[in-house]
Image (spheres, rainbow, N blue to C red):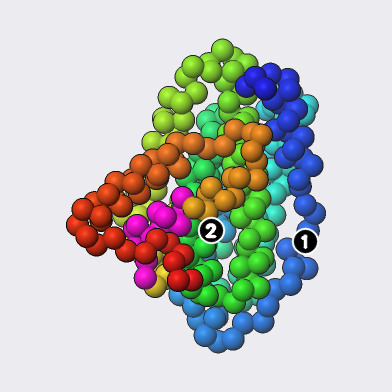
């Protein structure tokens, strides 16, 4: 299958549309939480950021969909906008049910180039989701919250994987159609650089609540016991590989997994030479 071809477009759009699931966040099997679980949820410092980010995501994707000329691509992007808005509704429902502390904040009106906003959002989602896969798995193994909540949020994570795969294929298709295929990896580096810059800003803010515009899964260190950079990176790399394996016939993000793989290889080599090699992520779980 040639990247940028009609067959490529048909495959990544129709697979995305066909895999859409219909559900209402209000009718999901939300569990009753005991006081200890409620307290753990209320100490997490970034629910406000998550809600704002998801609301902003729906607005960005919806605005970009209105500019897409190709009917099939537009249908797929519109569907992604629906799912992003539903993510915000899911977070909002959780906040309401469990009385989580947030400050109501509506997304600022979008201005400027919608393509650039969509590209920034897409690459940022690739970065945040790669990190989020690891944080989610660590939190689940640590039983940070009751399993029924992880089951609900696993549905959201699965949709994020679909969004990432769709975005990566759309970007490659779009660039190939305009004769920019040789620049594809340079463009990815540019937008990942912008995403990392936003991530660094979030990390610097640390545990303080910020303006809600950037959410990073690296803040998981706030609430995960036994968190170490190596354990986190191992979890991200393993979970990304497991989740992306569901799309063997489409392009998938390659830069972040490759960088993580190289980093982990270096860390393991250093550990072996120092004679301090510890158990890999998941050992003994």
| Rendering coords of residue 160 (x, y %) | 61, 49
Q: Give me the residue at 58% from left, 26% from top.
A: 172
Where residue 178 sits, quadrant-wise, is top right
Q: In this view, does 5 lie above or below 45?
A: above
User: Seen from this angle, which residue lies furthest bottom?
Assistant: 35
Label placed on residue 24: 1
Is 171 located above or below residue 29 in the figure?
above
Q: Nearer the viewer, residue 242 or 232?
A: 242
Q: What residue is shown at x 66% (from left), y 50% (from top)?
A: 159
- Work out how far the residue at label 1 is from the one at label 2, CA to CA, in angstroms: 19 Å
Tell me the chief SS of the magenta region. helix
- The quarter of the picture where residue 114 lies is top right
Give the residue drawn at x 59%, y 50%. Answer: 243
Residue 117, numbered circle: none
Considering only vertical position in the picture, is 187 above or below 30? Answer: above
Q: Where is residue 19 in the image (x, y as percent from the top left)?
A: 76, 45
Does the magenta-highlighted stretch encompass residue 235?
yes
The mark nearer the N terminus, 1 or 2, is 1
Residue 31 image position (x, y, % from top left) = 68, 78
In the rendered image, residue 159 lying in the magenta stretch gets the answer: no
Q: What element carries label 1?
A: loop
* Region in magenta: 226-237
Q: Mark 2 points at which residue?
A: 50
> Where's the N terminus, which quadrant?
top right
Q: Is residue 273 visible?
A: yes
User: Hey, which residue is sitting farthest left in the picture?
Assistant: 274
Other-residue count near label 1 (Cα within 10 Å), few / some / many at <14 / 14–19 / ≥20: few
Q: Residue at x 67, y 65 (%)?
A: 152
Q: Circles 1 and 2: CB distance less than 8 Å?
A: no
Image spot of residue 74 (x, y percent) = 73, 31
Q: Is residue 84 visible?
A: no
């Amino acid at each position: 299958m040639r990247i940028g071809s009609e067959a490529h477009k048909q495959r990544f759009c129709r697979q995305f549309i066909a895999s859409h699931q219909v559900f209402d966040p209000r009718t999901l099997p939300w569990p009753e939480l005991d006081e200890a679980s409620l307290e753990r949820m209320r100490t997490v410092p970034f629910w406000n950021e998550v809600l704002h980010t998801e609301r902003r995501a729906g607005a960005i994707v919806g605005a970009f969909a209105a500019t897409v000329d190709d009917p099939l691509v537009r249908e797929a992007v519109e569907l992604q906008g629906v799912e992003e808005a539903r993510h915000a509704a899911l977070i909002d429902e959780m906040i309401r049910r469990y009385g989580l502390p947030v400050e109501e904040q509506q997304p600022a009106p979008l201005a400027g180039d919608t393509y650039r906003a969509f590209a920034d959002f897409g690459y940022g989602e690739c970065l945040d989701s790669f990190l989020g896969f690891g944080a989610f798995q660590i939190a689940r193994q640590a039983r940070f919250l009751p399993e029924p909540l992880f089951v609900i949020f696993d549905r959201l994570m699965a949709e994020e994987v679909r969004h990432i795969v769709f975005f990566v294929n759309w970007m490659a298709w779009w660039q190939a159609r305009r004769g920019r295929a040789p620049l594809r990896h340079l463009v990815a580096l540019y937008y990942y650089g912008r995403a990392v810059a936003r991530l660094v800003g979030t990390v610097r803010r640390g545990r303080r609540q910020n303006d809600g515009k950037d959410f990073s899964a690296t803040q998981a260190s706030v609430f995960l016991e036994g968190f170490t950079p190596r354990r986190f990176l191992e979890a991200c790399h393993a979970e990304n590989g497991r989740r992306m394996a569901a799309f063997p016939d489409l392009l998938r993000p390659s830069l972040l997994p490759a960088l993580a793989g190289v980093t982990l290889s270096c860390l393991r080599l250093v550990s072996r030479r120092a004679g301090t090699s510890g158990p890999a992520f998941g050992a003994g779980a």
